[in-house]
Image: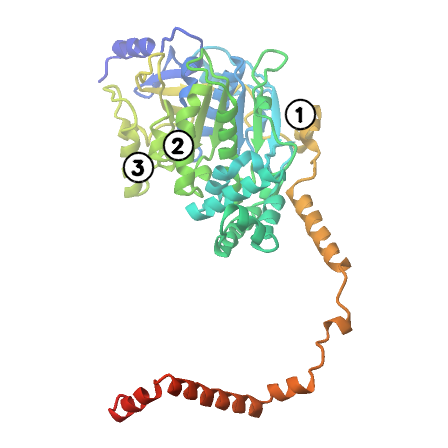
Amino acid sequence: MPDKETFIETIREGYSFKGESFKLGAAMLQGKPLTGVDVLLPLRTMNRHGLIAGATGTGKTKTLQVLAEGLSAASVPVMLMDIKGDLSGIATAGASNGKIEERMASIGGTYTPSAFPVELMSISHESGVRIRATVTEFGPILLSKILGLNNTQEGVVSMIFKYCDDQQMPLVDLKDFIKVLQYISNEGKAEIEKEYGKISTTSTGTILRKVIELQQQDADLFFGEPSFEVDDLMRISDDGRGMISILRVMDMQNRPKLFSTFMLSLLAELYGSLPEEGDLDKPKLVLFIDEAHLVFQEATSALLQQIETVIKLIRSKGVGIFFCTQNPQDVPPAVLSQLGLKVQHALRAFTAADRKTIRQAAQNYPETSFYDVDELLTQLGTGEAFVTVLNEKGIPTPLAQTLLLPPASRMDILSEGEILGIIKRSRLSAKYAKTVDSESAYEILTAKLKEAASLQETAPKPTASASRKPEKTTAEKILDNSVTRQIGRTAANIITRSLLGALGLGAKRSAKKKSGWF
């Protein structure tokens, strides 16, 4: 039996941080919470990324909600990916009940219902502040990785971007990109090949099919102007709390490619635009990706490599990323190894494969003499989880079975009226509401082709008399006659043989014939 006093001392020492932190819950031993033995999260290492995992119904989403509330209260802006539609309730205060009061008595402290400052956003048909990006902002490399192109096709895409830059033709939406692709395959092929080299129609055809596939997942809603400015994600509300931007993507389960496109675009934009910060006292922005398997399941190997690279490097920009998923194995190992904070809810062992997964999950955590992790992973109750974080020195804290705090905001979805009210009050709604259709590659090339067609129609045509060939003379008719041509060839042969005989070559020919050479 583990020693209780040793356990309490270990947890209090392991979860005591010099900088600012907030409470996640109370540590548990032998299935019972220890009041006052707090499990805290240090803000200083929240940019080291994290994982929230567990089976359906174990409380992952509510844990995500508690983390978002704690960060917002500490003046850290947050962005949430709301896949199931149940995170919008964070904009409204929760309500106390018997279960919440009982839990708070076990954890220690009082329950104070609170609403948090929220912006509702969308990249699809859902209501919210519209987030867009232009094709030009993606760039040829990122767009090629999204489309899953090979090196040859990626070269064609790079050439398209270079041509558009040289001709000052902005690539705003997919309509622009498709128009240029069609132009270089047909009317403009000679012009392009003269300046940039040969283009394979097989490559352009493949690229076009890939773009159409992306369009079928409503990517046209995402590509366009005005493009979203990432600074609008890092705002502080009037009362000093961090804004919580909730991206409403409830329809993304049928559009995983669009979702991964958006996520990679956002991460790349954050990494490219934010300055190097090093280790800050608290992060500048924290992103929570619910149902994270949607980001990875449609990703090509090149796209996964790009995501891994950004995850590794974006920490130095002061940005933390948390993945929320049912199974830790949903996250690629190279990304999983970068996640410093881990909150593991219960896993279910229905099959031999499930038991293997549980053993692998248990090995992801620091060794402990206080718990049989393999066994407890299947026995954790709703709202309970194993927790470990990184301290200021980057060392994992002791593994703690934790009874988690309940969210202070509503643990339910908002009504349609409440959602529309938040959007109406939003300062960003008017800024991004109207689509801007500025002159871009599509309009420029369309005008160019119309002008070429118009010039061709107005060009003077040759008259019938000018185009008619002059009638042949009698002498020309005689010379063109086949009999006349044959007579001419015979006469020419006779003259040639006479000349050869005069030169003394005729006798040799006769000698050769006699000797059997011919």
From this viewpoint, which residue is outermost toward the top? 18
**Residue to which mark 2 is pinned:** 308
**Residue to which mark 1 is pinned:** 428
41 left or right of 436?
Answer: left
Asked if the residue at tag 3 contacts the one at tag 1, i.e. Cβ–Cβ closer than 8 Å, the answer is: no
**Residue to which mark 3 is pinned:** 357
**Where, quadrant-wise, is the C terminus in this rendering?**
bottom left
Alpha-carbon span between mark 3 and mark 2: 22 Å
**Amino acid under label 2?**
Glu
Q: Is residue 92 visible?
A: no
Asked if 73 appears above or below 494 in the picture, the reply is above
Q: Nearer the viewer, mark 2 or mark 1?
A: 2
- Residue 188: x and y in percent read 60, 52
Residue 246, quarter of the rendered image: top right
Secondary structure under tag 3 reads: helix
Alpha-carbon span between mark 2 and mark 1: 31 Å
Name the residue located 52 percent from the left edge and 19 percent from the top edge: 69
Asked if 427 appears above or below 290 in the picture, the reply is above
Residue 457, quarter of the rendered image: bottom right
**Amino acid under label 3?**
Thr
- Residue 121: x and y in percent read 61, 30
Q: Earlier in the sequence, mark 1 or mark 3?
A: 3
**Amino acid under label 1?**
Leu
Q: Nearer the viewer, mark 1 or mark 3?
A: 1
- Residue 57: x and y in percent read 44, 33
Q: Nearer the viewer, mark 3 or mark 2?
A: 2
- Tell me the crowding category of disc 1: few under 14, some 14 to 19, or many 20 or more residues within 10 angstroms, Cα based: some
